[in-house]
Amino acid sequence: SNQIKNAKLVLLGDVGTGKSSLVLRFVIGQFVEFQQSTIGAAFFSQVVSVNGESVKFEIWDTAGQERYHSLAPMYYRGAAAAVVVYDITNSATFTRAKKWVQELQAQGSSNTIIALAGNKADLLEARQVTTEEAQTYAQDNGLYLMETSAKTAINVNDIFYEIAKRLTQV
Ligand code: GTP
Ligand code: MG
């Protein structure tokens, strides 16, 4: 159909993993080295066209700082999709990502599509989380994984496009 499908999408993940940077890359095509830490949450929207259908993402970019954790359910409740972000150069952020996935699977809607973004994939020499480790985890938990870079733009549009594709199939 030619109807626009609205889809609430939330980004979750540890502080500094690049949630805001991924959204800004996707929505305005830009990257800044000194992105400010998000306070509370920020809202963006962007339309993606896939197979002749349009999906309008209503994006909640949440704050990774622990003191905002209790706000998260407001943003993931009823979400069509969640992108859980970790930083491939920081294994603690991968541990935190797994916690977010657990929380989403326990408290979120059962039909929320969950994507895992291993961000900062441009910093290969500093890698702490292997692709294999992340891929195994993703497969075991029914998520799909993409290693992204908000800096170089690698896989950024792709992760949102893949979500849009899945949303138009339901
Ligand atoms: P909070 O809002 O505090 O939760 O952080 P965030 O997840 O939104 O991270 P943010 O986008 O603010 O990025 C944190 C820092 O990482 C910034 O200095 C970014 O420039 C940098 N950064 C984000 N994505 C990438 C990336 O793909 N590669 C590199 N090299 N740096 C990145
Ligand atoms: Mg942010």
Image: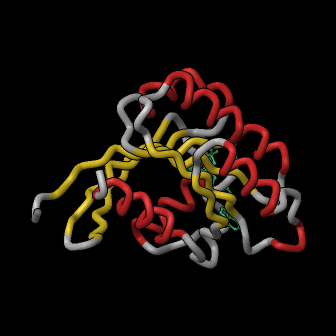
From this view, report whether residue 24 is shown above or below residue 12: below
Q: How many marks?
A: 0
Left of 94 or right of it: where is 139? left
The location of residue 53, given as percent across then percent down, is: 20, 66
Left of 139 or right of it: where is 43? left
From this view, report whether residue 66 is shown above or below residue 123: above
Q: Residue furthest left?
A: 2
Q: Residue furthest front?
A: 140
The location of residue 26, given as percent across then percent down, is: 45, 67
| Camera-side residue of 3 and 27 | 3
Quadrant location, the N terminus: bottom left
Left of 141 or right of it: where is 8? left
| Camera-side residue of 109 and 93 | 109
Q: Quadrant of residue 31?
A: bottom right
| Camera-side residue of 142 and 58 | 142
Left of 159 or right of it: where is 43? left
Q: Is residue 102 visible?
A: yes
Determine the residue positioned at 72% across, 57% down: 135
Q: Quadrant of residue 95?
A: top right
The location of residue 7, given as percent across then percent down, is: 30, 48
What colour scheme was applied to this rendering of the protein? secondary structure
Q: Is residue 42 visible?
A: no
Q: Quadrant of residue 79?
A: top left
Determine the residue positioned at 34% across, 44% down: 8
The location of residue 2, given as percent across then percent down, is: 10, 65
Determine the residue positioned at 21% across, 53% down: 5
From this view, report whether residue 86 is shown above or below residue 2: above
Determine the residue positioned at 54% across, 54% down: 20
